[in-house]
């Protein structure tokens, strides 16, 4: 090998050693355990240093030695260079793997970060979308939109609504003569519906107000106008009562008028379709002819219901019956009008001529102003029912009445129970009430309500007796201590069922239960002396409020057919008698049928003189007159307590009709 070749090999090895050193140095920063490489690099460096020294200081005499050393160094360096080349390739492969792994790791981390951020952002974007959607109606339109020529671009929903209504204001009216009716705005809802469509999605460029589907709304407006101007025709009918001639006076028929609702509805719809929202419409009124004239009315009017009851010979009581009959006589009720007994008769006072008569007050017979007027209200109730008119308020007595069959009575009291009925016929009705010779007759005068041949009546049946209340005790110092004496025996109560019987001719169409009622019995009154001493017997008996010697003395109002006279001749008996069972004194009945509104009878008492009552407070017996002779116009007396009423006992009496005018 030449010197040149040796030098080239030396330089090549030196260069490879330097490159290897750089590679090893770089690898040593990223790896551990590279001490062997560094040692090799040191040796390489030492070799280069030795060679350098050999070159700078050689001489001719020492050339081979230096050359040998240099050659040896070069050979050694070359050997090390080849070894380091293999290590370099392994290191480069490792580095590439690390680089690829790092890139993949960074990419994975980046993807994860973006994914997490996307998840966090999605709900926010959804919320934003929701908020934007919900706020669309209030945002300003960016797109140009026209509604029947009204440009609402850049307006909020409310601004757009105002702009449309301003351009199409609602001021539609309908007039008749001097009167005007303002038709309700029918387009406000249509505008709102259209704006909802515009502001809820992608709007179109042009829209037009929808005027369809307003038929019902227009018809409703026409009906309201009709209610304002319609006038019912008046048939020829009674209009007043002439007391002097005791006749009802007639007036001629009157023509009515009715709005042409069909035409007005069409006119409204036509104006809306043209978008003529401030149209001024004119109502068309059509005449309505009455059903019958005055002359025809005189032929149609008749007595449609009448009822008669017998009074007693008690002059004071009869005065009260007569005055209350006169108070309701001549009353006229227009169709739909309601009658009130208390309002019509007014308060029963001495100033009006009412007398004190026997009546019940808290279970005692007392003399009260107006006693007996319940017979007038009960007679009226039956007349009204027979005429086919509708009773709206009625209440039974607390105790059985004697002048009508129990269950067909109607008690009244000032500031208490009232009797009411309504004129449910098509024409005015008149009430005629007459009292004469212990007889009261009340009739309803009008155009027939019931069909030809149809009749209404009440039929009451006693279902069972009720035990009398427990006895009450009164002190009598004239009796021996421990001795008891019966002052009055009392009476049983009763339970009644009243049916409305509907007939056509002789055929019974129906007989439904109208109401039921319980009447109280009277408590026995027992005299006793609990003082332990006996008082002188010369003392005068207590004065009775009812004269027992007067020929006209009667059982007090509401006493009923079961009233038992106080018995002063009854012998002595031992104490402890009398009993009370459930239902023996209280009860109630209700009704809502043609026979009456709700009614009840209970243990309580009504105002003195007009309501039901109790037993006598006198120590002497109250004389009962003989029952009046029954006629075709009188009511048969009810059964005694415990007596079987029989099949005909409770049938209301048939009375002769009153003559007309």
Image: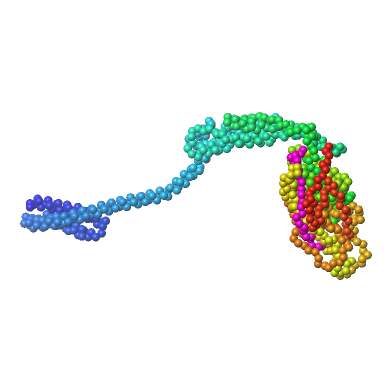
Seen at 83% across and 47% down, the residue is 634
Q: Toward the viewer: 352 or 425?
A: 425
Residue 480 x %, y %: 88, 69
Q: Is residue 465 magenta?
A: yes
Seen at 67% across and 30% down, the residue is 284
Q: Is residue 255 above or below residue 336?
A: above
Can residue 216 be seen by looking at this rendering? yes
From the viewer's perspective, tell me whether residue 495 is left or right of residue 121.
right
* Magenta-drawn segment: 447-472
Residue 348 x %, y %: 84, 48
Q: Is residue 260 above or below residue 628?
A: above
Q: Residue furthest left?
A: 61
Can residue 51 be seen by looking at this rendering? no
Q: Is residue 433 magenta?
A: no
Query: Could you tell me how many numbered marks the image carries?
Result: 0
Q: Is residue 479 above or below residue 332?
A: below
Quarter placement of the C terminus: top right
Q: Is residue 259 above or below residue 111?
A: above
Q: Toward the viewer: 396 or 88?
A: 396
């Amino acid at each position: 090998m030449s010197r040149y070749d040796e030098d080239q090999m030396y330089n090549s090895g030196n260069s490879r050693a330097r490159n290897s050193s750089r590679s090893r140095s770089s690898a040593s920063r990223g790896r551990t355990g590279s001490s062997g490489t560094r040692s090799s690099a040191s040796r390489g460096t030492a070799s280069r240093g030795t060679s350098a020294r050999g070159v700078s200081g050689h001489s001719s005499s020492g050339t081979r030695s230096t050359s040998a050393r240099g050659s040896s160094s070069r050979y050694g360096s070359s050997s090390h260079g080849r070894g380091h080349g293999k290590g370099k390739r392994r290191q480069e492969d490792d580095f590439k793997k690390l680089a690829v792994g790092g890139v993949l790791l960074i990419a994975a981390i980046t993807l994860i970060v973006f994914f997490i951020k996307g998840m966090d952002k999605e709900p926010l974007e959804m919320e934003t979308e929701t908020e934007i959607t919900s706020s669309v109606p209030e945002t300003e339109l960016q797109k140009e939109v026209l509604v029947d020529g009204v440009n609402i671009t850049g307006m909020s929903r409310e601004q757009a609504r105002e702009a449309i209504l301003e351009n199409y204001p609602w001021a539609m009216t309908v007039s008749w003569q001097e009167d005007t009716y303002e038709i309700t705005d029918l387009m406000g809802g249509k505008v709102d519906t259209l704006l909802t469509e515009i502001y809820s999605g992608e709007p179109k460029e042009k829209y037009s107000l929808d005027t369809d589907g307003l038929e019902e709304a227009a018809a409703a407006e026409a009906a309201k106008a009709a209610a304002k101007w319609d006038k019912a025709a008046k048939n020829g009918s009674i209009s007043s009562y002439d007391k002097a001639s005791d006749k009802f006076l007639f007036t001629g028929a009157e023509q009515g008028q009715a709005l042409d609702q069909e035409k007005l509805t069409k006119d409204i719809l036509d104006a809306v379709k043209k978008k003529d929202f401030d149209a001024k419409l004119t109502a068309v009124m059509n005449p309505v002819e009455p059903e019958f004239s005055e002359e025809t009315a005189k032929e149609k009017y008749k007595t449609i219901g009448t009822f008669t009851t017998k009074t007693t010979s008690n002059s004071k009581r009869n005065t009260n019956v007569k005055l209350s009959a006169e108070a309701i006589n001549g009353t006229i009720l227009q169709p739909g009008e309601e009658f009130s007994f208390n309002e019509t008769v007014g308060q029963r006072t001495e100033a009006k001529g009412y007398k004190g008569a026997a009546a019940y007050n808290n279970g005692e017979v007392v003399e009260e102003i107006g006693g007996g007027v319940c017979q007038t209200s009960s007679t009226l109730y039956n007349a009204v029912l027979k005429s086919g008119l509708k009773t709206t308020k009625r209440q039974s007595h607390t105790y059985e009445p004697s002048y009508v069959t129990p269950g067909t009575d109607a008690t009244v009291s000032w500031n208490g129970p009232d009797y009411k009925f309504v004129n449910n016929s098509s024409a005015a009705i008149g009430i005629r009430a007459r009292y004469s010779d212990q007889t009261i007759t009340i009739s309803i005068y009008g155009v027939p309500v019931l069909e030809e041949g149809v009749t209404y009546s009440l039929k009451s049946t006693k279902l069972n007796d009720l035990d009398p209340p427990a006895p009450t005790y009164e002190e009598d110092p004239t009796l021996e201590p421990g001795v008891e004496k019966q002052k009055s025996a009392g009476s049983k109560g009763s339970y009644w069922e009243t049916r409305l019987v509907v007939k056509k001719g002789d055929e019974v169409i129906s007989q439904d239960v109208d109401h039921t009622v319980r009447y109280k019995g009277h408590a026995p009154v027992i005299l006793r002396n609990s003082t332990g001493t006996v008082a002188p017997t010369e003392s005068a008996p207590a004065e009775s409020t009812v004269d027992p010697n007067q020929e006209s003395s009667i059982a007090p109002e509401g006493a009923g057919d079961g009233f038992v006279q106080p018995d002063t001749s009854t012998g002595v008996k031992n104490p402890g008698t009398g009993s009370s069972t459930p239902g023996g004194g209280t009860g109630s009945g209700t009704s809502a049928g043609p026979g009456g509104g709700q009614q009840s009878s209970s243990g309580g008492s009504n105002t003195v003189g007009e309501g039901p009552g109790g037993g006598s407070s006198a120590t002497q017996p109250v004389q009962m007159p003989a029952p009046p002779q029954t006629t075709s116009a009188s009511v048969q007396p009810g059964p005694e307590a415990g007596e079987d009423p029989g099949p005909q006992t409770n049938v209301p009496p048939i009375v002769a009709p009153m003559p007309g005018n």
